[in-house]
Amino acid sequence: MHEILIEEKILARNDEIASENRKALKGKGIYSINIVSAPGAGKTSLIERMAGELKTLGVKFAVVEGDLEGDFDSKRIERHGVSALQITTGRACHLDAHQISHALPWVFGQDGIELLVIENVGNMVCPAEYDLGEDIMVTVMSTTEGDDKPLKYPAIFNASDALVINKTDLAPHTDFDINRARENALKVNPYLKIFETSCRTGAGVDAWAAYLAGVVKDGKKK
Amino acid sequence: MHEMSITRSIVETVEKEMDRAELTRLDKVRIRVGELTAVEPDVLRFCFETTIKGTRIEGAALDIEEVPLTGRCKDCGNSFRITAFESLCPKCKCTNIERIGGTELDIVSIEG
């Protein structure tokens, strides 16, 4: 009986495909973001709001939608003049790099896009471990959730580059303390860029879109 | 539940290594799981046991080394366990901390 050393990442195969995705997207000059949240925090609403703002800023984007079932979300997004591809994951609770690699030919067929928005399956646990090949991961949390969420689901906040706190219009009606939420999020990940939005009123979406347009343009320079 | 798909990734790697080493049975699979991953060791153990039933890995034990969230002080070099995400060096009380452990999700070795 002897021990055979392996020493590799369990998700090495996923990471490999993710790197290929990243390289392919970069080769076409497309920046990509992976949006994650609990179900109902407002990922799709945020993308709908981004349609108008990013159009004004001159950034054309397409969306890959991950859901367990149905094409409800891609239909919502297409109503705003943004092309969307629905991926149904069946029972899987997250998208993986392999699924995204299959979506890339469609992405590359979308004329003139500079940004790919991947809306992950509504889940705050599983997507944390799966690199899709995106440039940045964005977590959305809403004021109808607990402001201690970053401490309860630290992996996803730690893996993210940006945090959007959504439904700020509802904050006065809940016990959610936005400052405490910010503090908790920064405790888990001091590098998080934090934005506050209300997708219902549109408040704050301009700042979020301006940040995105900025990273898209910066990404091109690299 | 992504522990199932993580288990599948483990099993794929293990089977590949067994082929390479021409092993027909296995005693142990050793993995490393960081505290700050979204992986629950107990769930992973359950998934592993279920998945390997009827395969040539059946009977192998899953040995999980849990790695705590660990920080290192960039000023005084002290390494320490981070609790409650406190970013303060317990020795010199500065906040110039880098995280050096806690996000591992590795397959370490197999024994057979």
Image (cartoon, coloured by chain):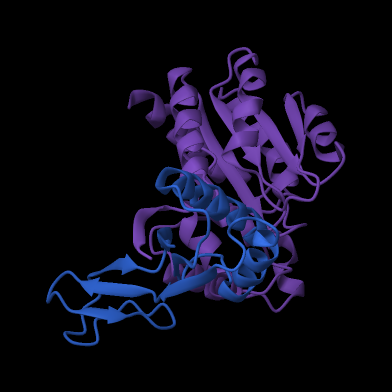
* Position in image of residue B108 (x %, y %): 39, 61
Chain coloured purple: A
Q: Can I make out residue B16 in this image? A: yes
Q: Please give left or right for residue B93 compared with residue A151 in the image.
A: left
* Position in image of residue A168 (x %, y %): 68, 61
Image position of B57 with respect to B82: above or below: above
Q: Residue at x 50, y 37 (%)?
A: A18
In front here: B106 or A193?
B106
Q: Please give left or right for residue B2 compared with residue A174 in the image.
A: left
Q: Colour of chain B?
A: blue
- The count of marks equals 0
* Position in image of residue A71 (x %, y %): 85, 36
Looking at the image, the residue that sits furthest to the bottom is B91
Quarter in which the N terminus of chain A is drawn: bottom left
Q: Residue at x 29, y 66 (%)?
A: B100
In front here: A218 or A20?
A20
In front here: A122 or A55?
A122
Q: Please give left or right for residue A222 compared with residue B36 in the image.
A: left
